[in-house]
Image (tube, rainbow, N blue to C red):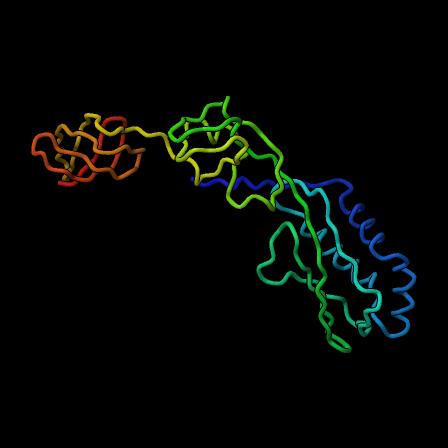
Amino acid sequence: MVHTMARQFSVPGLWLAIALIVASALPGAGRAGVAAESDGYQSLAAIHKVVYEFLQERAQGPGVIDRVVIEHLDPRLRLTACGAPLQPFLPDGQPGVGRLTVGVRCSSPKPWRLYVPVQIHRHIEVLVAARPLPRGVVLTQDVIRQERRNVADLARAWYTEPKQLLGLETRQAIRAGEVFSPQLLISPRLIHRGQELILFATSGTMTVTMKGQALEDGAEGDIIRVRNLSSERIVEGRVVGGNRVRVSL
């Protein structure tokens, strides 16, 4: 089962920090903005404010927000002062972290639309390999460690709780420090190639059992090839236990 394990956190003081970043990005923006609006132009400070409030409402997602940077607008920008509330929005396909763009539009008296570049930095504590692991290793507590990673750098799903990993098996070799993901792991193999096992088939209330031999490894639920030792036929069956495979009649 795939786990993304996204958790939500509130960050005290985060939005004060955003306000400071906005203020530092526009020297004298407050005074210039008021003057510009009185001359019939839209205040750039007001645009930054609506973007800041829009992001504040959406400060949710996996991990903890480290920093939000709202990039400054060109002070020479001249937009008609909006006679209606500014409308912020996220264009389609925008990520929840990293570099993105927030749109701001005005509906009257003269409609316009503007896109403001923003950077959102989040980190999360994820589980990684404590040492290099070859293929076929069953995970135990001593091969798992926790590390802080940038959410934007995590291309796959990840794990945050060791109990989700214990007992799983590496599907391939894993480097030290590599983030554990469902693509790298499989359920432990219950059947091993060459193992003698019980083949069984059911029809209504009747169950037929016979001896067989596994021709490949398999975890619970896997379909594997087996040899019926009575008939020497090779058939496929589903692994249902440590030495049992269900086949069709």
- Which one is in front, 40 or 154? 154
Classify 31 as above or below 231: below
Quadrant of the drawing holding the C terminus:
top left
Outermost top residue: 142
Classify 32 as above or below 154: below
Outermost left residue: 231
The image quarter containing residue 6 is top right
Give the percent coordinates (x, y) of residue 126: 57, 35
Give the percent coordinates (x, y) of residue 224: 24, 37
Relative to residue 92, is residue 113 drawn left or right? Answer: right
Number of marks drawn? 0
The image quarter containing residue 229 is top left
Give the percent coordinates (x, y) of residue 152: 60, 46
Q: Residue at x 71, y 55 (%)?
A: 118
Relative to residue 184, is residue 74 drawn left or right? Answer: right
Q: Residue at x 58, y 30 (%)?
A: 146
Q: Residue at x 53, y 36 (%)?
A: 179
Give the percent coordinates (x, y) of residue 96: 62, 51
Q: Residue at x 59, y 62 (%)?
A: 92
- Which one is in front, 43 or 128? 128
Quadrant of the drawing holding the N terminus:
top left
